Image (cartoon, rainbow, N blue to C red):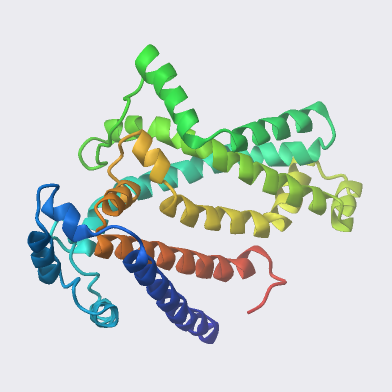
């Protein structure tokens, strides 16, 4: 097992290296000049040139990449061009809102989607199944920002039950922390609930047709025990894969939700960096998200033998 984990960890190095090269080239070759943005509309060509020299943007692209890669190997993601602060510090400041939103969304989706998927598979072809699948298609089809604005109008502006926007740290006020996460969690969670419910239904349908399920029923076991202890347990590998991948997707894909609800997370940081052409921040955020993807997938692979004893490394 140790050798397997070591191989997988070592395999992440070339993956992150390729991501670093692609991100660096895409940003440098894309239109826009951070020096011009910093200088302002009234700046002269000499002003912009001076700022480019100060930022090191006038040097050859290969030299810029080698310097950035050398800093990266030392654990330094560089400094923000616009804010003149370490990129790692900026990312760490924004981790709590994004991680909190991702985890609450994942929990919300799991509590709804797994029972819905199991019920739909158990009553396959019935009106219950058709209703759940229709709701899933609807939730998956509606854009997140549209759901978010609808919730804001209905629950915040009209009924005044919940805050419209913003974020409060858990350490500062746990109650306000929870209240500010309700609307974004529902808005983002409905889409993920639809996906997870469909995956759960599909895997449960396949498992319920297996011989060991018919044997369990022939022995007189009750339906709840058959569904939960036998069918769901054996169908858990694809479901866990979807949940784990979804966590990585949520961490990296909350840009729209954070924008709608003005949550100061990594998504908002990315948008601000893109608008300001802040290369180091964009590169740092993408590398961190890529690393999250890689290590979440590694954790999922390590969890497989615990879910299914037939799987071996």
Q: Nearer the viewer, residue 280 or 305?
A: 280
**Residue depicted at 8% across the width and 63% down the height:** 46
**Residue depicted at 24% across the width and 41% down the height:** 169
Residue lying at the far top of the rendered structure: 158
Which quadrant is home to the N terminus?
A: bottom right
Residue lying at the far bottom of the rendered structure: 3
**Picture coordinates of residue 148 (x, y %)?**
44, 30
**Picture coordinates of residue 143 (x, y %)?**
53, 35
- Give the left or right position of residue 293, taking residue 29 as reference: right
**Residue depicted at 47% across the width and 33% down the height:** 187
Q: Nearer the viewer, residue 24 or 53?
A: 53
Counting the numbered discs, the total is 0
Answer whether residue 100 is visible to the viewer in this image.
Answer: yes
- Give the left or right position of residue 269, taking residue 59 as reference: right
**Picture coordinates of residue 138 (x, y %)?**
64, 31
Q: Nearer the viewer, residue 218 or 85?
A: 85
Answer whether residue 159 is visible to the viewer in this image.
Answer: no
Which quadrant is home to the C terminus?
A: bottom right
Decide: is 62 above or below 225: below
Decide: is 80 above or below 275: below
Residue lying at the far right of the rendered structure: 218
**Picture coordinates of residue 203 (x, y %)?**
74, 52
């Amino acid at each position: 097992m140790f050798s397997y984990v070591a191989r997988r960890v070592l395999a992440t190095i070339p993956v992150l290296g390729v991501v670093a090269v692609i991100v660096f080239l895409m940003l440098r070759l894309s239109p826009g000049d951070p020096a011009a943005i910093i200088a302002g509309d009234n700046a002269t060509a000499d002003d912009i040139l001076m700022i480019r020299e100060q930022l090191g943007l006038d040097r050859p692209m290969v030299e810029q990449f080698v310097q950035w890669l050398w800093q990266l190997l030392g654990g330094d993601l560089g400094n923000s061009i616009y804010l003149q602060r370490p990129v790692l510090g900026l990312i760490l400041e924004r981790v709590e809102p994004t991680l909190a939103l991702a985890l609450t969304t994942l929990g919300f989706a799991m509590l709804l989607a797994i029972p819905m998927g199991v019920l739909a598979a158990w009553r396959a072809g019935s009106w219950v199944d058709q209703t759940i699948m229709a709701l899933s298609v609807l939730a998956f089809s509606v854009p997140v920002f549209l759901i978010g604005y609808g919730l804001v109008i209905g629950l915040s502006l009209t009924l005044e039950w919940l805050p419209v926007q913003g974020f409060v740290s858990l350490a500062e006020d746990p109650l306000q922390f929870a209240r500010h996460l309700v609307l974004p969690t529902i808005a983002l969670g409905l889409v993920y609930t639809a996906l997870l419910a469909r995956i759960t239904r599909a895997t449960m349908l396949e498992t319920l047709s297996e011989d060991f399920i018919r044997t369990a029923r022939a022995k007189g076991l009750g339906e709840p025990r058959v569904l939960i202890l036998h069918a769901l347990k054996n169908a858990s590998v694809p479901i866990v894969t979807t949940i784990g991948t979804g966590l990585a997707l949520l961490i990296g894909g909350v840009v729209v939700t954070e924008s709608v609800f003005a949550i100061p997370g990594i998504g908002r940081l990315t948008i601000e960096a893109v608008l300001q052409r802040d290369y180091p921040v964009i590169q740092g955020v993408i590398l961190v998200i890529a690393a999250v993807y890689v290590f979440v997938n590694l954790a999922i692979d390590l969890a497989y033998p615990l879910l299914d004893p037939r799987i071996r490394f």
